[in-house]
Amino acid sequence: MVDPAQNGLRFRTDAPVSDPAVTVEAFAEQTNALAVRIEPGEDVRLLLPFLDRLRLVEVNFPSFGDGRGYSAARILREAGYTGELRAVGDVLVDQIAYMKRCGFDAFQPDELLDRGDVENALSRWPDVYQPTADGRVPIWNLRHG
Amino acid sequence: MYQYDHYDQAMVDARVAEFRDQCQRRLEGKLTEDQFKPLRLMNGLYLQLHAYMLRVAIPYGTLSGAQMRALGNIADKFDRKYGHFTTRQNIQYNWIKLEDAPDILADLAKVEMHAIQTSGNCIRNISSDHFAGAAADEIIDPRPYAELLRQWSSFHPEFSYLPRKFKIAVIASETDRAAMRLHDIGINIVRNDAGELGAAFYVGGGMGRTPMIAPLINGFVPLDQLITYSEACLRVYNRYGRRDNKYKARVKILVHELGAEEYTRQVEEEFALLIAQSIEPPFAELERIRTYFDEPAFDADASDELDRTDPDFAVWSDRNTHPHKTPGYVSAVISLKPVGGIPGDATADQMRLMAELAEQYSFDECRVTHTQNIVLPHVRKADLFALWQKLDAAGLGTPNLDQVGDIIACPGLDYCSLANARSIPIAQQISQRFHANGKGEILGELKLKISGCINACGHHHAGHIGILGVDKKGVENYQLSLGGSEAEDTSLGKITGRGFDEAGIVDAVETSVDVYLAQRQDGERFLDTYRRIGMEPFKEALYG
Ligand code: SF4
């Protein structure tokens, strides 16, 4: 298992939550749970009543081609979730820039990523067209001051 | 025409650099083919039967002379001196080397072009009416909305790994020249009773294995909510579209399985949440884009007369022009369907000539049609004869727009790794047959479309006559269908019965056409006669 803190793919300054992430179902029942893991087919909106106590959401990507986790991440951020949002599983260097835009701030890939490739990927785009969860000002607004 | 500012240019340049890096990592073995595949696909690079194919985006089908010239030069430098214009208003190069792909993208970026999202499970190039900005019947030029959607959908981080590809078309007239309702989202810009402009959203159309005509889900989305509403449509699809079976993954299946009403309800619910996020671009941005599509400086004194002395020219101008909103002008259509030719192919020299003619006669603009022809949208009637002479001399003056020779055909088994059967030779034989027997001249409008497999890139479902290549125990076989239409009276063709072999399908088309000729009443097109008399007489003649 890759430690996201050690691998450097954590873009937060607070201390990582050490609790294990439980399933969505278990999370709803265990009133002291802080960390949850959601699978592609699960409705992320089930977590919205628990935003107060949520500290870590792991979004699983069993295969990088399944993009449901991108919507899950944005929905959480749009609803005001500010805790750690970690992409786990088949997370590749060419996806992490988009994941970051959708609100992920930690990555725990199955396979270790090359640091240089990650830096290249994250610094590639000078600007962005759409407003998303990362708060970057889109080109549309830059054009009009 | 839209022109990049430094922001747009920087985005495209970044993409070239990114793809260069990805190709490099692939060549170094840092990326497996499985990992590289979706990345190259998002840059339009397919691995076909014999080589890589590169598909270049032509947003809403509009090109400047310089862009058309660059396409010709790329064909010379990196391919076999020709390119293939596609049914999605794009161009494909069929003989590309992987090592060259980044350089081609760099050449494209120099003329504000790219291959972004021309493939892959993402939002594809936005298509539109090829007579936009020129047609006498349009409410407004639809292209500013298409350009806004282009920017929104480019590198959209949430929608780059959708269940399946996603195609959007935007039109703004009652006459549908873009097969709008056969797209994942079809947008028709309309005016309401109060005179305001809005967007009618049709969602869930498509061809392929399960052809469907998109239902209307919202008749009037205000234009300052266009992006937010599109985003809601996509998010519902991204979350709930099927991912277990690629043949059931398009949004049309989701809309069909949920029912249009339930899909609409979910979209509206998502929209209500998204509108609070203020993701809509400032209205000033739409205004900025619109200024690029201002009318060219038309000559107010342009003569409305046409000298029809030359009989060949008269035939061409009757068939291959379309009424323009400005007196004294027409839109001229250059047929890429010479008798016996490969539908949609143009040589590098022809592309450069079309570029020059666009600059000289059409305010530096040309268009690609989804029927694989090229339009010069704004030609003075007084210049039409001179234009035709130059086209004719270059083999570009075939007078067959919307006629039986104006066939849509996909690349088929000559290039495509998914094909069951060849499309191009069938198109060539049909075109030659109807030229030789003279019937092509008397048929009037007849839209014939050929696909080499069920993916329906050749739009066969929407052909007045459609041909589909199927594989029958390892032998190429062709199904015939009748009665499809992609226009505002959208309908899907019906299969006549058992299939035909290569020679048989050409005969079967002629037999069907003979039934029409024998039965047609005043002014009826093939489609009208078919709709009036039904399938039976055709079946009778075909299978007797
Ligand atoms: S219809 Fe089939 S054969 Fe033709 S281009 Fe599409 S996938 Fe290939």
Image (spheres, rainbow, N blue to C red):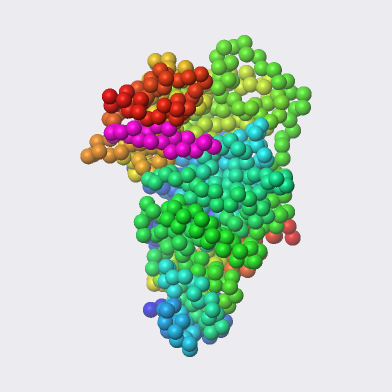
Q: Is residue B342 visible?
A: no
Is residue B466 covered in magenta? no
Q: How many marks?
A: 0
Which is nearer the eye, B63 or B199? B199
Which is nearer the eye, B151 or A4? B151
Query: In the shown orientation, is residue B143 left or right of residue A11?
Result: right
Ligand 1 is found in the corner quadrant, namely: top left
Q: Residue B41: image x %, image y %?
A: 44, 52
Is residue B489 covered in magenta? yes
Query: Is the C terminus of chain B in the top left, top right, bottom left or bottom right quadrant?
Result: top left
Stretch of the chain drawn in magenta: B477-499
The residue sitting at 46% across, 76% down in the picture is A58
Q: Is residue A113 above or below residue B234?
A: below
Residue found farthest to the right:
B301
Q: Residue B306: image x %, image y %?
A: 66, 17
Q: Is residue A62 visible?
A: yes
Which is nearer the eye, B465 or B102? B465
The residue sitting at 58% across, 16% down in the picture is B313
The residue sitting at 41% across, 26% down in the picture is B533
The residue sitting at 33% across, 34% down in the picture is B479
The secondary structure that dominates the magenta segment is: loop
Query: Is the N terminus of chain B in the top left, top right, bottom left or bottom right quadrant?
Result: top right
Residue found farthest to the bottom:
A32
Residue found farthest to the left:
B473
Q: Residue B267: image x %, image y %?
A: 55, 59
